[in-house]
Image (cartoon, rainbow, N blue to C red):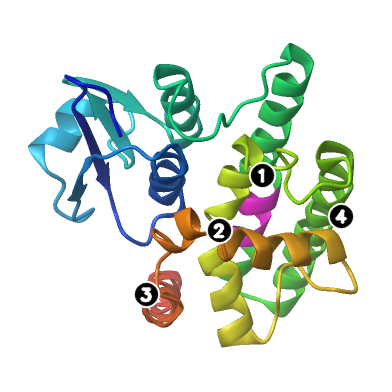
Amino acid sequence: MAGGGDELKLLGMWASPFALRAKLALSFKGLSYEYVEEDLKNKSELLLSSNPVHKKVPVLIHNGKPVCESQVIVQYIDEAFPDAGVPLLPSDPYDRAVARFWAAYIDDKLLKSWLQASMCKTEQEKAAAMKETFAAVANLEAAFKECSKGKPFFGGDAVGYVDVTLGAVIGFVRVGEALHGMRLFDASRSPLLDAWLDRFAALDAAKAVLPDTGRLAEYAKMKQAEWAAAATN
């Protein structure tokens, strides 16, 4: 629970993996907060005034002060509430730097190429983007082996910063499998991450906030239709 006098409000959008990161961090820390669902086609004045630079979710408002960008928010939650729940960032400076590196890699390499693949107009373009995506998966598989040291999570025995960063995309991994028969992490190509995904998703703190796969699949189909329509205009 947030400490006495701590007021937490999260501005998000239910299908956003970036907003989900903040929800996961709050859930693993056991913090109570007010959640505000944003309509991204009709953004609230609170969102626009809280994040005037990017005008995006998520935004965490702590005692009236806004914190923006999902990875910054997760780090802030961990630092602002060090005694709550599990520590997300390692205490050792080197391990903390490694965790930040791989969390950034997830956004800069894995998610970027994976999103590009979903928006490609030709099969050739999609194949090139997926090749890049699976190269990123291979690097993350090696990173998991190094960071976990044989334990269940990137953070070791307990969930850590990289687990939360990657855990936020589990819903879309499941949607990719449901809609296209393609699992981003699989037992042959990335057995450690494949087992990690099911292990992470089974945790109570994760189950409490992970979106429904069916609802997310409908959302993904709608977004792909919008992208296809925009591409033909």
Residue 117 horizontal/vertical position (percent): 64, 66
Residue at x 21%, y 22% (from the top left corner): 6
Pointers 1 and 2 in contact (C-beta within 8 Å) = yes
Q: Local crowd at mark 4 within 10 Å, few (<14), some, or many (≥20)?
A: some
Q: Please give the residue where the numbered disc 1 appears in the rendered image.
A: 106
Secondary structure state at the residue bearing disc 3: helix
Tag of residue 138? 4
In this view, the residue farthest toward the left is 45
Name the front one of labels 3 and 2: 2
Residue at x 46%, y 77% (from the top left corner): 213
Secondary structure state at the residue bearing disc 2: loop
- Residue type at mark 2 is Val
Residue 190 visible, this orientation: no
Pointers 2 and 4 in contact (C-beta within 8 Å) = no
Closer to the chain start, of discs 3 and 2, is 2
- Residue type at mark 4 is Ala
Q: Quadrant of residue 143?
A: top right
Q: Is 202 placed above or below 158 here?
A: below
Tag of residue 127? none
Pointers 4 and 3 in contact (C-beta within 8 Å) = no
Closer to the chain start, of discs 2 and 4, is 4
Q: Is residue 113 a member of the stretch shown in magenta? A: yes
Residue 200 horizontal/vertical position (percent): 62, 58
- Residue type at mark 3 is Tyr
Q: Which residues are magenta?
A: 110-115
Secondary structure state at the residue bearing disc 4: helix
Tag of residue 169? 2
- Residue type at mark 1 is Ile
Closer to the chain start, of discs 1 and 4, is 1
